[in-house]
Each structure stands twice: as structure tokens, then as C-alpha cells.
Image: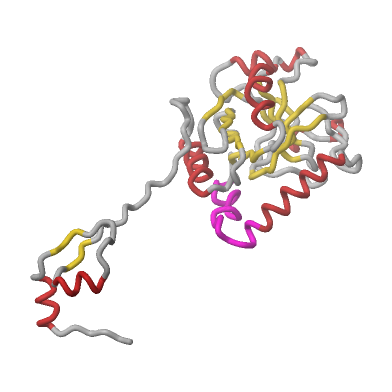
Amino acid sequence: MAVSFNTHQVAAAENTPQFFNPDSSLSAHQVSGAGLGVRTRPTATPHPKQADFEGEHRSDPAQHVADWVVDSGDNRGMAFAIVDKIDAKVFVFDSRGRLLGAAQVLLGIARGDYSVPGIGNRKLSDIRPEERTTPAGRFVASMGHNFKGKDVLWVDYIDAVSLHRVITNNPKERRLERLATPGPRDKRISYGCINVPAKFFDKVVSPTFTGRGGIVYVLPEIVSISEIFKSYYDVESAPARAASANLYERTRALLHQQDPRFGHNAQPY
């Protein structure tokens, strides 16, 4: 039923003493019978949730994506990591967005935000320098093992991209020295994998992602953040949720089976 008010009724209502009824203890009929107007407590606008970097230096894009992950719940209640390729740094968070640790990283020698199709099935010797990129994106990550039996955090299993302890078997590459230098200048050396200090892997990465796994967000360095993460902005979208769940299950299945058809380069590099 439509309800309308004339100007006298509106004026009378505006002049009615306002009774504060914060807990709604009086019904509408009681208030009307008493000749009182009801002023309810205004609903507070919730503040967006933010990631807690614990004072760690980070770029604006890293802060932005981490805040979005926490506020949207895109990490699905799991631990997550932000890899900032421009700053050559990784941040690992618990499921609530509290920083567990941060470290410098080594990345693919070639700049770029996409992997060459089929690169996971190619021999390392066949991968040209310009193809050695660390892909950007949102990845369902899980602990596993490479072909040598070493534990790694698989970021993109099919394309053989993992986060692992720094490799030191080629002294000419000076990977330990590169990790120790400040800033991103010396950090481009790998075939695409993300190298971290061994202590950081053992103390932060392994205990955080062992068991349930988590999400790794690799920030782009050439294309925009919105281009990489556009599929995940609308976290309430049913297709987006279904796609995320499907990707998670398929990745878990691959890691469980260690299917030899995939990841022929399942070795640290």
C-alpha cells in the first residue's frame, strides 16, 4: 500500500521530539501511541580491511594488491604471498593479511608478464634468454618436489615456475651476492623461477604453505595491474568463484599425481 504525507503531517513530524531508541526496544506501535519520533543509531560505514606489513618497506602496488586481497577475501582464507617484480621482493602473509616475512628475490632474466606457451615442456637449453620470464598473475600455490626431490613451492606447475631456495651451483651467476645487494638492479638471472634466501624458505615459506597451500600474486612489470587481475576484481561473481575453485582443484590434482607429461623442466633454475 502506498503511503503519502501532506505538508502539515511532515511539519508535525519534524517538530516531534526525537526519542533515541538504539536497541529497538519499543515497537513502531508503541512509539506511535506515545507520540514519539524514533531516532535509531546510524549504521557505521565499515572501513576497508588492510594488510599489515609490520612496517616493512613496500611499493604502492604491493600495498594496493595486498589490501585488496584482504578486503575482498580473494585468498579464500589461505595464506598468500605478494611478489613485486619491480622491487624484486616477496611478502608472505597469513590468512588474515598479517606479514610473516619479506625477502629479496631473484627473477627471470627477461622482463615480461607472460610465459611462452609450452615452455614447461621444453629443455632448459632450448629456452632462449628473451623467453626466461617470471609470469605475473594469481596462482594457486602448493608445496611439492622437483625431479631431484627438493621441496619447492609450485607457483605454476604446468609452466614449471616455482619459488625455491636460491641456486648456487653456477658460481659465475653470483646468485648469493645478487640477493645480498640492495634494490632490484642485480636480481634478474633465473630462467623464470623465483629464488629466495634458503633461510627465508625454511623459516617462512615452507611452514606457511605446507599442508593447505595458498595463493601467490605476482605483480606485473610491463602491463597494468588491472589487466592481470581483472578476472578477480568481482569476487562476488559466480563465474569467477567457479573458475577459481576449478583452477585450485586441477592444480592440486596435478601436484598430487606429479604427472610426467607436465613440467619437464621441474627443476630449480
Query: Residue at the spot x=73%, y=37% of the render?
Result: 142
As displayed, is residue 249 above or below residue 38?
A: above
User: In the visual, does 11 lie left or right of 250?
Assistant: left
The answer, for residue 39, to whether it is visible in the render is yes
Query: Residue at the spot x=81%, y=24% of the render?
Result: 150
Viewport quadrant of the C terminus: top right
- 238 or 18, which lies in front? 18
In the rendered image, residue 145 lying in the magenta stretch gets the answer: no
Query: Residue at the spot x=28%, y=61% of the render?
Result: 24
In which quadrant of the rendered view does residue 193 lie? top right
User: In the visual, does 249 lie left or right of 31?
Assistant: right
The answer, for residue 108, to whether it is visible in the render is no
In the rendered image, residue 228 lying in the magenta stretch gets the answer: yes
In which quadrant of the rendered view does residue 147 lie? top right
Which residues lie in the magenta part?
A: 223-241
Image coordinates for residue 237, horizontal then vertical, percent: 58, 61
Magenta segment, principal secondary structure?
helix
Image coordinates for residue 21, horizontal then vertical, percent: 22, 59
